[in-house]
Image (cartoon, rainbow, N blue to C red):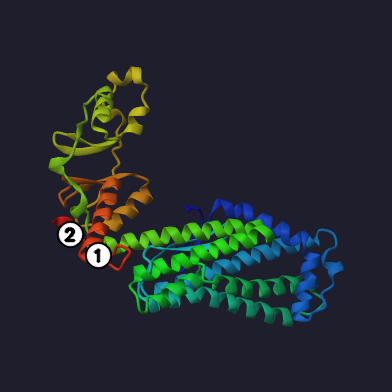
Amino acid sequence: MRGIRIGSAFGIPIKLDLTFLLVLPLFAWLIGSDVGNLVGVLNGVFGAAMPADALTAGSLRWILGAAAATGLFVCVLLHEFGHSLVAMRYGYQIDSITLWLFGGVARFTEMPEDWKQEFTIAVAGPLVSVALGVVSYVGFLVVPGRLPAVQFVLAYLALTNVALAVFNMLPGFPMDGGRVLRALLARTRPHAQATQIAAEVGKLFAVVLAIVGIFANLFLVALAFFIYIGASSEAQQTVMRAAFEGVTVGDIMTPAGELDTVTADTSLATLTDRMFRERHTGYPVLRQGRLVGMVTLDDAREVREVERDAYRVEDVMATELVTITPETEAMDAISTMQQEGVGRLPVVDDAGELVGLISRSDLVTAFNIIRTGGAATGTGTGIGRLSNGADFLRR
């Protein structure tokens, strides 16, 4: 979810995902087309007497729809700032806040594992939503009856903000309520185990939400799908983080002495032959023993087969390399691969010399070995945690 940056506040970049540019007009249209019914609901909830006929006349309904939808997403943005600012007080860095199809996402560079911190950060967002609902309701009471359009928008925001807070506090991990559940579970359990339990509850919640959505609103089905995927993904990330605790790139990488490399002047025809024989799809490229690039199967495919004898590896290799050091944590290596969209990283020392290579397959193999070792020795929590993962890999 990269998004389009539109500004920043408190040092946090604010982004819009492309899906937001689609859903905002959709929400505006849905609200505008239903102003008559919404006026009846809001009058009933708040004991008001807003005139439905006046609010649905001409193009006013569409103006109200646009205003209410925009106000709602501004409130969602403030909800995410509630999470983010509390997290910043604890010393966590916020990568960005992105508005998208299902509201907003605050992306942390590191998730808290202290249950008290996570609890406080998780409840901050819903508390902001409740506060916005109260402020909107006070505004609704203060605005005179001769301004029914303003009353409508404020009443709508008052109701939806409270509803947003309540919905977010349902135990659908990784929603706010799911994170609160994990924080409470982590009081007496390891963080990884608490995550696993909260994720299972979140998946169950997603299934129930999907069933309700089939009969009520297909939007809920889509939301349930993303909750299910999010719960599974975060549980997997937490288990990996627990397994790789104390494990560095140097523990996992293929050392330079065991690497298959190519020289910059190797022909592409020779390279593709080697890839076929050795079942490798990427190689570090050396010139006079120094790392100068990386070449992959995709690079070779850019040249037609009949022309590959005339091209050299240096003609197609990537020269702007993302490298990593042996001391880097294994989880940081995973994050770097995900962010850069690469499957392998050259490992260099402080002098810039190539000392190894780490790939996704290296990380997967190490993860499976650590989990197997944990199950065999009985030192884990039942979901693969090993506090001595680095020592196990060095055996």
Instruction: Give the mark nearest the N terminus, 1 or 2.
Output: 1
Q: Is residue 262 above or below residue 323?
A: above
> Residue at image x 38%, y 62%?
109
> Residue at image x 41%, y 61%?
234
Q: Where is residue 310 in the image (x, y as percent from the top left)?
A: 28, 19
CA separation in Å, label 1 and label 2:
9 Å
Q: Residues within 10 Å of mark 2 (few under 14, many from 20)?
A: some
- Image check: 217 left or right of 350? right
Q: In this view, does 295 lie above or below 362?
A: above
Which amino acid, mark 2? Phe
Which amino acid, mark 1? Leu
Are discs 1 and 2 less than 8 Å apart at CB? Answer: yes
Indicate the secondary structure of the residue bearing disc 1.
Answer: loop
Q: Quadrant of the C terminus?
A: bottom left
> Residue at image x 65%, y 63%?
70
Q: Mark 2 points at which residue?
A: 392
Determine if residue 345 is in view: yes
| Image quadrant in which you'd find residue 39 | bottom right
- Image check: 259 left or right of 200? left
What is the number of the mark on residue 386? 1
Q: Which of 181 and 121 is in front in this view?
A: 181
Q: Nearer the viewer, residue 183 or 7?
A: 183
Q: Nearer the viewer, residue 201 or 182?
A: 201
Q: Which of 8 and 194 is in front in this view?
A: 194
> Residue at image x 14%, y 36%?
289
Q: Is residue 103 above or below residue 308?
A: below
| Image quadrant in which you'd find residue 205 | bottom right
Query: Most extreme residue toward the right, as rendered?
Result: 53
